Structures are given as C-alpha cells and as structure tokens.
Amino acid sequence: MPIRNYGVLKGTIVRKTFDRDPQTPHYHLLIGGGTWFHAAINMWSSLDHSSLLYLIDPEFEHPVTERFEQLPIGFTDLPSLPNSGAIDYVRGELITRHRFRVAPMAHEKGGGLGDLLDLYVTRAINQPDAIAYVFGTRWGPNPRETDRTFHGYPIHPSDGVHDVHMNQGNPDRRGKRDDQHFHENGPWQDGAIFLHFPEEEQWVSIFLAFQSQEWETDDLSGKPRTQVDHSGRRKANNRQHDRVIRIIAALVNPIGAAPEDERVTLINTTSDRIDLKGWTILNADQQETHLHGVIEPRQSQMIAVSPQAPLGNRGGTITLVDDRGEKIDGVAYTRGQAQREGRMLTF
C-alpha cells in the first residue's frame, strides 16, 4: 500500500547536522513549526550501495508555490491527489528526469550531497524570514520517545518527517529485504525540500531519487511499468523515447474576452514524420485537447487549445500525452508569467 501520513512540514530551519554513518547517512534538519520537528534526509542508498540522484534548482518557478505559501506553520496532511498540494515527480510538471545528476561521493572530511545542501540550508538558517517546506512521511508524534539528534534541543514527543525523496517506481525485488519499498509505491506522494527566501523573492527546490527507481510508473499504483524477466533483467518495452516532441511555447492569456484563443506550440525533434492522431494535451485539471494530423521532421506546429480544456491565467501545467497514454513532455507556468495579455510564453 502507499506510504502513510504523507504531507508537508512548514517552518524555519534552526539547526542542521550530518551523520556520516557508512550504512545509512542522513542529513538532519531541526525545524521550528509551532513545536520542534526533525527532518531526516537520505544521503545514500544502503540497499543499493549507491549515491542518490539529485536536482537542486536555485531559480524554481511553478504555480504550486502559491499553494505552499497558504499552508499553516507545522505539519499538514495531504491527500495523494492532483491539485491537493501533494507533489509528484512524474505527473506534477515540477522537473524532468533528464536534469538529475548522480550525487558526488562523500568522504570523512566532507564532500558529497551533504555539502551541496549546506550551501542553501546554511543560508536559510542565517535568514530568519526564510521558510522551509519539507514533503515526506510523518513518523510522530511518539510520546514514548525523545529525539536527541540535536544537542540542546530534545524533541519530545519525537516527531518529524522522512521519505524526503521520490516515493514511486521502486522495483519489485521479490523476497529481498527491501521488498517493502515496492509496496510503498504510489502517485502524488513524493518527497522534496523547498526553501523560500522572501526578501529575494527566490525559491530553491531540492529533489532526490534513488538510482534503482523507475520513472515510467503506473498512474494508479505508482509501480514501475518496465517489465522484468525471471533473471531480474529489464526487458525492452519498445516505447518511443519520451520528449521526441517538445512543448516549446504557449499563449495562455490571449488578448480579448473568454473564451480565449489559446495556443500551444510543439516541435518535432526527430527526423521522422509523427502522426498525432490519438494524442492529447492536458491542462492542470486533466481536461483534454485532442490532436490530429502529422508534424513534420524538425518542424514546429501551433495547436489550438479546446475551449473545454482552458489553460488559465493564474498559473498551471501543460502535459503532452501520446496515443498510448504515455506522457511525452510537460511544462508549468506561474501566475506572474501569465499576467501579460497577449504574451507568448516560451519553455
């Protein structure tokens, strides 16, 4: 079953510490959110003995940040559904897997993913108005335990957040000791860290994933779609490589009254003609614009958006899906980006 007690912790970072346990190293944050909370962030895969994948975006822009700012201080439970405030690496148009990198190895004197996080976490500690949003699983409050991770700041009852990473696409290892993670797969329950620096009007996002996790996941279960044979090797599924067609621009706020003549511009990055029959463009509410015709090699094409699937002027997402229901590309835009009437947004 999917993970339990999923949500987001909002508060100010007061302390940080990093344990360099060779088996299960974690980066720890003490967060004040009405009371004390402990956020434990994986730095290494103890099961695969490998570094994590990471993406740190110091100029993060996405309409979800407006929703974040409306949250109360402390931990907020979130239903694992679209438009609930929950996040999803695959479906939320927050990121693309192509931007992730393997974290550098740490050593006794430092280095590694912890030092990369330090750059922004230390800044957040030194700026009292900085707010952290940590998405993951809550483990407390546990009245039988006192958390003494942070010297001088005992947390009683023990309370905090972990699973601050992608929580879908875990492989089925059939009987191995980490098989539990396969059963914890689910959509709209991923973990991440967002740091807001109001004075600079800056958002920094930190996304983490394990190298063993698949990115092609089932929309209902969050389990990998890639088939595995009895030897444990992945089978080729003959899927068309994603992003062969890219969303490169959109007119989300045309001049004039509603219904507006909204447009999305696609480009065929390949040397082949691609038939768009059965393809769709989805807005943030999963409403569909059905495509047709052919897009020529290395050519762009402007698509008229259906009045029944408006993009909206207050920020949103645009997702391109092929005739098999597979996501090919996706983008997001903010309220601020959509404010100027008649402006073509580029991605």
Image: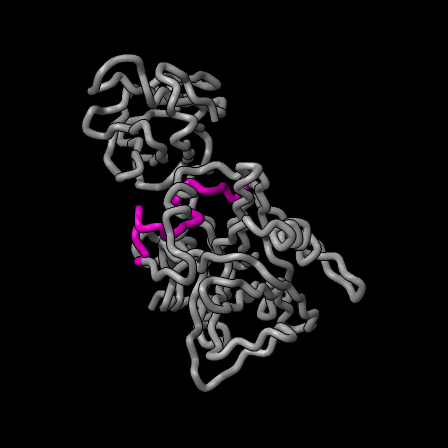
- Residue 194, compared with residue 161, is above or below; it is above
| Total numbered labels | 0
For image coordinates 50% across by 60% down, the residue present is 164
Q: Is residue 75 above or below residue 275?
A: below
**Image point 42% across, 40% down: which residue?**
93
Asked whether 273 or 111 is in front, the reply is 111
Q: Residue furthest right?
A: 109
The question of residue 105 being in magenta is answered with no
- Percent coordinates x, y for residue 48 in the rendering: 59, 66
Q: Is residue 229 visible?
A: no
Instruction: List x then y, in percent, for residue 57.
Output: 57, 42
Instruction: Give how far across and how far down residue 125 sits, in percent.
Output: 62, 55
| Percent coordinates x, y for residue 126 in the rendering | 65, 52
**Residue 285 located left or right of residue 44:** left
Q: Which region of the structure is painted magenta?
A: 79-98
In-front residue for pair 284/211: 284
Q: Quadrant of residue 151?
A: bottom right
